[in-house]
Amino acid sequence: ETGVTQSPTHLIKTRGQQVTLRCSSQSGHNTVSWYQQALGQGPQFIFQYYREEENGRGNFPPRFSGLQFPNYSSELNVNALELDDSALYLCASSEQAGAGWETQYFGPGTRLLVL
Amino acid sequence: AQSVTQLGSHVSVSEGALVLLRCNYSSSVPPYLFWYVQYPNQGLQLLLKYTSAATLVKGINGFEAEFKKSETSFHLTKPSAHMSDAAEYFCAVRIRTGNQFYFGTGTSLTVIP
């Protein structure tokens, strides 16, 4: 069974640029959630995708956007990067949305540094 | 609004001693509750979860947590700490009608040999 994978592992961008982060869900999972984890903080929910549709969003501006593909892999796009966007970005997949108690399986994250 | 408070950003225990990591939540109805562990440069791994069955929940690696509604708490314990338990621990809540997890700010556990 393949776990959740994310790419790239590390990324350096400059302010104003755009970035795309990628996530491959665990086999059989149709739901993916994205989190931002700033240094020394807990993960903050960005949004969730279920069967290619956005299924909930946290308190993040529209320049944070996402996609989920038919194979349930996912992308997180961030436009107009700001210094405060520097963080570890985590992707988590689960079997289905809405049950509430389903386990989310996390990838190792992508560490983004904005200069 | 949902929130999670983890008391103590850093906890140190001796090897073999009791581990107690505190978590309190704020929610109008009992939510689903989770504890995750994060090792350096890795993602989060689920330790255990409360889904309104038994209030005492047993997880992996000898950890357990007890849901106490009257105290709105879900503290994580382990009777005897191992060196390999040194990591960052996160408590998280999820309301039953939503799909958003709310994480605490984490507790860094150090195990002293």
Image (cartoon, coloured by chain):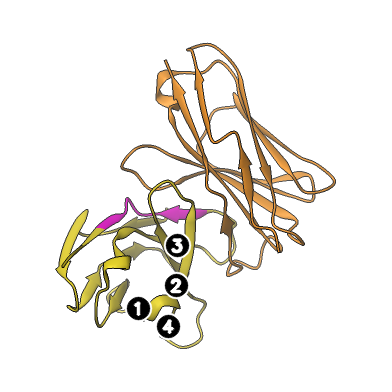
Residue B69 got which mark? Answer: 1
For the point 17% across and 78% down, which residue is it?
A: B17
**Amino acid on which the number 1 mark rests in the picture:** Lys
Q: Chain of mark 3?
A: B
Where does the magenta region start and end? Answer: B101-108
Q: Which residue is mark 4?
A: B57
Q: CA distance from mark 2 to mark 4?
A: 15 Å
Q: Can you give x and y, in whole percent of width and height, for residue A39 in the image? A: 34, 37
**Amino acid on which the number 4 mark rests in the picture:** Val
Asked if badges 3 and 1 are on one and the same chain, I answer yes
SS under mark 3: strand
Residue B30 got which mark? Answer: 2
Residue B3 occupies quadrant = bottom left
Is A2 on the left or on the right of A80, as rendered? right
- Mark 2 residue crowding within 10 angstroms, few (<14) / some (14–19) / many (20+): some
Residue B80 occupies quadrant = bottom left
Residue B93 got which mark? Answer: 3
**The magenta stretch spans residue B107:** yes
User: Which comes before the other along the chain, label 2 or label 4?
Assistant: 2
